[in-house]
Amino acid sequence: MMTATAIQGFTQVDFDAFLALRAEEPAWLTTLRKDAWQRFEALDWPARNEEEWSRTDIRLFHLDRFAMPTTSDVAPPLAPGLLTHDVDLAGQLIGYNSQAATESLAEEIASQGVLFGSLDRLVIEQGDLLRPYFDREVVNRSKDKFAALHAACWSGGTLLYVPKGVAMEKPFHALSALGDGGIDLSKTLVILGDGAEATLLTETASTSETDSGLHCGSIELIVEPEAKLRYVNLQNWSKGVWHFAHQKATVDRNATLQWTIGALGAKLAKVNQEVALTGPDAEVQVNGVMFTEGRQHLSYNTHQHHQAPYCRSDLLYKSALQDRARTVWRGMIKVDVAAQRTDAYQRNDNLMLAPTARADSIPGLEIEADDVRCTHGSTSGRVDESQVFYAMTRGFTRTEAVRMIVAGFFQQVFDRISIESVRVALGEAIAQRVQDLDQPTPSAN
């Protein structure tokens, strides 16, 4: 069993101590970790002269202010999460500072061969089963220094494995929490076998609104032929958390994926989200909701990669910005030569709630096939004052009027979400963040 030992930094000595705590892991995983650590040490931190990072400044980020995960943290009482109200769950996992705190799985579900719980534990118990999926390297471990760090030092995390032909009606839920100054290096791995069906709700939270912390994580979704996955990821860290993540799904023949993200928290977030349609007739829908305030900076790079013919992808991101917050969205649809008859769409809309907010929207297409339909769109605008005035003449305060307008702005995304608890939770969380705008917002000058 792992022993409780503090690890204070990210040096070679610290990494060796980290591996010593994980001596029960399969040898193949230790080899992968060591290889990723060598990549981490060889890579430089991203620079502002790199196109992907030109609008995201991480000069104030210092890794040496954090430490590798330990097994000594005791989780405080944690709320069950925003997405689970009135939801009958098949299983639940709650993690704290990169460690599993509690986990549960209904016996009738486990009896069908379903695995759900701490990835730390299950990779030891089911190493032979999981090795081929790690070997796929769904997320490129050399993408950048953050990806390599995570691949070397991931800890905690969630596994959902649904065998071939098994359909789960009840959703699974995983919550990752951070204490003040804590670190979360969790990995989420979802594997749906041929013809399987499942829903996974994941969310993050901090123990208080002022906590600092670091998340450097990954999400890997593997959707095999004919499988159907609904995946929700709500990022709701406190405003003092640095959030770096690489997220990728592979969707095979006749498989479907609905992927919904909500980005509400973090001091700075830099996320790469990719979907790869690898088999004919695969279909993906990506829904994104972002709300920023204060001086938050959220940067999301999305990539729809069509590798096979007759596939469909549809991405819709909407963001609303208050105060001096900033969002960056860079979208790319890439169509390989073999991906004839592709139907792909991406759209990003931004609602500016203050003249001091800023939204950068950069859609893109890279098409190598000659029989495709690929389109994109982007809009940015302020709240329509005539709509605010109309609502106020009917007895609403300015804040109430703005909340209604914001809700209407996001409604197009909410209508695409098939999980009622997610629609309600996102709507309520955003409504709570709309500040009192009765007084005119000062100009940028």
Image (spheres, rainbow, N blue to C red):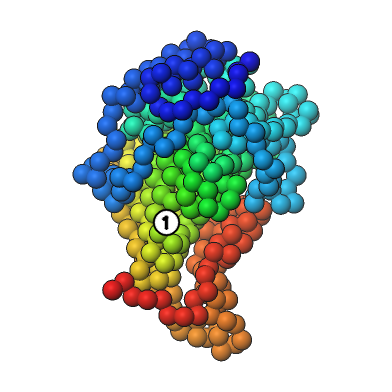
The quadrant the N terminus occupies is top right
Instruction: Depth check: give the residue in front, 330 or 285.
Output: 330
Q: Position of residue 305 (x, y in %)?
A: 37, 39
User: Residue, x 31% and y 49% (percent of image)?
Assistant: 56
Q: Position of residue 270 (x, y in %)?
A: 39, 45
User: Residue, x 42% and y 47% (percent of image)?
Assistant: 269
Q: Quadrant of residue 197?
A: top right
User: Residue, x 50% and y 41% (percent of image)?
Assistant: 181
Instruction: Depth check: give the residue in front, 236 or 222.
Output: 236
Q: Position of residue 131 (x, y in %)?
A: 51, 17
- List the single residue furthest toward the right: 108
Mark 1 belongs to which amino acid? Gln
User: Residue, x 51% and y 54% (percent of image)?
Assistant: 264
Is residue 330 shown above or below 226? below
Q: Where is residue 262 in the image (x, y as percent from the top left)?
A: 52, 52
Q: In which quarter of the image is residue 126?
A: top right
Residue at disc 1, secondary structure? loop
Is residue 88 shown above or below 97? below
Left or right: residue 295 versus residue 50 is: right
- List the single residue furthest toward the left: 49
Q: Can residue 273 be seen in this view?
A: no
Left or right: residue 161 versus residue 148 is: right
Find disc 1 in the rendering and name its residue: 296
The quadrant the C terminus occupies is bottom left
Instruction: Depth check: give the residue in front, 304 or 396.
Output: 396
Mark 1: give few (<14), some (14-19) or many (20+) Cα within 10 Å. many
Q: Is residue 354 visible?
A: yes
- List the single residue furthest toward the top: 27
